[in-house]
Amino acid sequence: MKLNSFFSLIGLSLLVFALSFSIVSVIEFSQVKKDYSSLNFIPSEADLVMRLDAKQLGKDFVKRILISGKSPLFTAEKTAMQLPSTFHFSSVDWTYPVYLFLLKSQKEWATVTIFSINKKGGFVGKSTNEPYQHAFEFNDKGFLVSGCSKESFLDVKRQIESRKSTNWNALVSKKESIAFQSSKLKLSGIVYLKGNDFVVESELNYLNPTRKIRKFLQPDGFHLSTILPQSTMGLISSQLNKFVDFGSYPSIESVSLNYFGIKPPYFPQFQLLVNTDQSNAIPRFIQENNLATFNDNGCNIQFGELMVTGKEIDAYTYSLSTVPEKKMNYSTTEKLGNIQGDLNKLIQFDNAPMLRMLLLLNSKSAAITQFIEKTKGVSLQSMQDKDGKKQHLVFKIEMKPAHNFLDEIILLLKSWEA
């Protein structure tokens, strides 16, 4: 679960979806104690840290989110965790913040939750045989380690007790009930609700792209534009080589996509702009691998019955489209990326009822579909600060009238527990 790209905020947002719905149960508004001693136990190698002010959010909902064996956050691949006999909630002091972080050990990720406890020796339960769930006490704190083997747990425990912590001061400065920080991305932010909508705001150290300017599509349908760091491009190439080994791929600097749904006979409808680091990289790659037939207007790439038309915009930009009749509008920009549009385009199957029926046959995919249908739009905007050292990111899910994000997320999570 390594977060290593500009748009890792999307993955982060998915993680906090489940956490954010707990705000619906605000039962106490008294001030949570300003104690940040738990930060001293979070290793420098932690990939993502979140702070939950449990008293403000409602401790019963925090229990359900953090500990439930059926929570999508903590379900192991093969064995769903069982509910607690590993530890006791009665010893937790809910007037202190709860911290959650991800830590990799022996090639698997552990989710660690830190509680402040008021009863020494009362946190760890009698059972120590729960699969993928372990607990221990250290320095008046209770630690729940989930989703990993016993061997990995012992390694995580050793790392925590060594107290080789890094600087997590960004979490101290955030006053909202849910805050997060990633040391690897140098990213920090907050999660909150605005009316019926869900918002994540964060500050990200500026990424240095290989080019200063690039071409992005004007948003239409469901729109995604993003730069691709070299590490991400390497990962994409390795995955593609598992299916079709072309050896090396062009170095792609950024991509811009407009997606319009699926039309018979089950073909995706899209426009795609690809910006490369080297000139004429895409046409050269297509020619060298005999992937298309060329004509005066560009080329045609055939995938079975699906036809993709390609055209060179300039030496560094190439377009691909399955809707050549639709005009492609684009502009030159210095932006690193954005998301904008209607999530419903992802589940739009024009005159293809069989696809929709297959989607609704599975209860989980049906629940996701029903949630998407109640959204009005999604966006991720990036704004550079004056000195050019940071990007301010705002991710937002806007709901349709009469639909509340929290209510719909609760319904979605219930379907995962069924």
Image: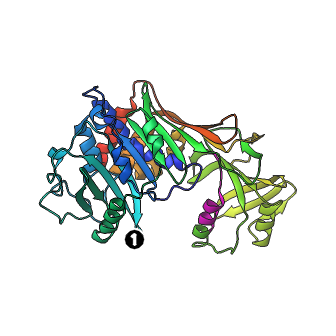
Q: Is residue 280 visible?
A: yes
Find residue 331 and report its horizontal and vertical position in percent. 77, 39
Residue at 47% x, 46% y is 181
Q: Is residue 180 magenta?
A: no
Residue at 34% x, 68% y is 155
In the visual, does 115 lie left or right of 246?
left
> What amino acid is found at the position of numbered circle 1 in the picture?
Gln
In the visual, does 375 lie left or right of 329?
left
In the visual, does 204 lie left or right of 320?
left
Rendered view: 328 above or below 176:
below
In the visual, does 112 lie left or right of 272?
left
The residue most toward the left is 126
Find residue 158 and report its horizontal and vertical position in percent. 33, 65
Find residue 388 and report its horizontal and vertical position in percent. 69, 40
Visual colour scheme: rainbow
Residue hosting label 1:
106
The prevailing secondary structure element of the residues shown in magenta is helix
Nearer-the-camera pick, 140 or 171: 140
Nearer-the-camera pick, 263 or 121: 121
Residue at 77% x, 67% y is 285
Nearer-the-camera pick, 70 or 63: 63
Q: At numbered mark 1, what does the secondary structure look like: helix, strand or loop?
A: loop
Give neighbour class at mark 1: few <14, some 14-19, many 20+ (Cα, 10 Å).
few
Find residue 258 and report its horizontal and vertical position in percent. 64, 44
The residue most toward the right is 296
Start-end of magenta stretch = 225-237
Residue at 27% x, 41% y is 62
